[in-house]
Amino acid sequence: MSASLQTEFLGRSYDNPFMNASGVHCMTINDLEEMANSSAGSFITKSATSLERAGNPEPRYVSVPLGSINSMGLPNRGIDYYLDYVLKRQTAFPDKNPAFFSVAGMSVEENMQLLKKIQESDFQGVTELNLSCPNVPGKPQVAYDFELTEEILTKVFKFFKKPLGVKLPPYFDIAHFDTIADVLNKFPLAYVNCINSIGNGLYIDVEQESVVIKPKNGFGGIGGDYVKPTALANVRAFYTRLNPSIKIIGTGGIKTGQDAFEHLLCGASMLQVGTELHKEGVKIFDRLIAELQQIMAKKGYTKIEDFRGKLRSIE
């Protein structure tokens, strides 16, 4: 009998912990339908702004040997496009878990408007506020400004009463883990998502002696194998610092069942796949499920909770 990947998350039960990462395979309704009909446990929409955005000029996403570099610039169809889809799906399939819904305003005011629209809607799923988009020229990552992050969340929770998680950038300093965890612990967050891409990397085509993406003179977010150790560190750091009621979604460098196992071992409850999903398409979830089950069976684990969060330190 194969190991169970059944996952409890925020009071709902999922067949497995796998999802897409926001930004990958979620731009259009067709993308979202493919995700909904895949083997993934759930899926999330593209981070939405108030109005449709074209995003940055192309080329803006390039697959490279150990992952990817991108500077997308939040291209999306606008909040109404995605909200209309998830509400129709919610009505059509009342017995299925609603999708996760991602928003990413270009200002504090826009974030408030987006979240108020969701609060006032009939959406019954989980909302994710993206505080970590690293690829909008001239816009810093909000979550690196600890005071601004606290200010935003204070405003949000005065009116937002539905389950809310936040997408975080990678942090690299123990003091920063401590400081941002202290901020996040002040609020009734449902989860944190660790991590968004590592911002402002540079990949060079030696033959052309050129950068490979057009926006920001070639600077872009790094994903894939490059970021897994950083992602695991962030998952572990927040799992050991946040209130137990705040769950962790692990994102970054998941392309095999072993990668998934490592994220879960660090304390993640759900897992998002980005770069490798972009490369392989939704069939990747069948492979990831099989590989994770094989690892669990080999170790004698029958369910994820047998090992989740139980990473050992060396005494």
Image: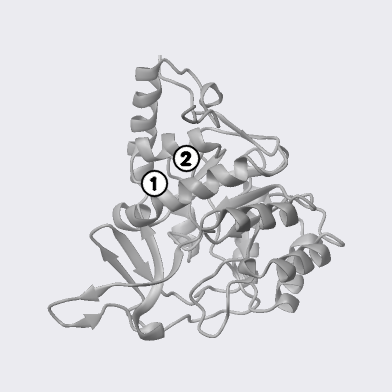
Q: Is residue 205 above or below residue 98?
A: below
Answer whether labels 1 and 2 touch (C-beta < 8 Å).
Answer: yes
In this image, 255 relative to 149: left or right? Answer: left
The residue that label 1 is drawn on is 254
Q: Position of residue 193 (x, y in %)?
A: 58, 52
Nearer the viewer's eye, disc 1 or disc 2?
2
Badge 1 marks a residue whose secondary structure is loop
Disc marking residue 266? none
Q: Earlier in the sequence, mark 1 or mark 2?
A: 1
Q: Position of residue 63 (x, y in %)?
A: 28, 64
Q: Quadrant of the N terminus?
A: top left
In this image, 251 relative to 70: left or right? Answer: right
Residue 286 visible in the current orientation: no
**148 or 27, nearer to the observer:** 148
Amino acid type of disc 2?
Answer: His
Badge 2 marks a residue whose secondary structure is helix
Q: Position of residue 292 (x, y in %)?
A: 38, 31
In this image, 65 relative to 289: left or right? Answer: left
The residue that label 2 is drawn on is 263
Q: CA distance from mark 1 to mark 2?
A: 8 Å
Give the total of numbered labels.
Answer: 2
Q: Is residue 242 above or below residue 15?
A: below
Taking the view exactly as shown, the residue that stands out farthest to the left is: 207
Amino acid type of disc 1?
Answer: Ile
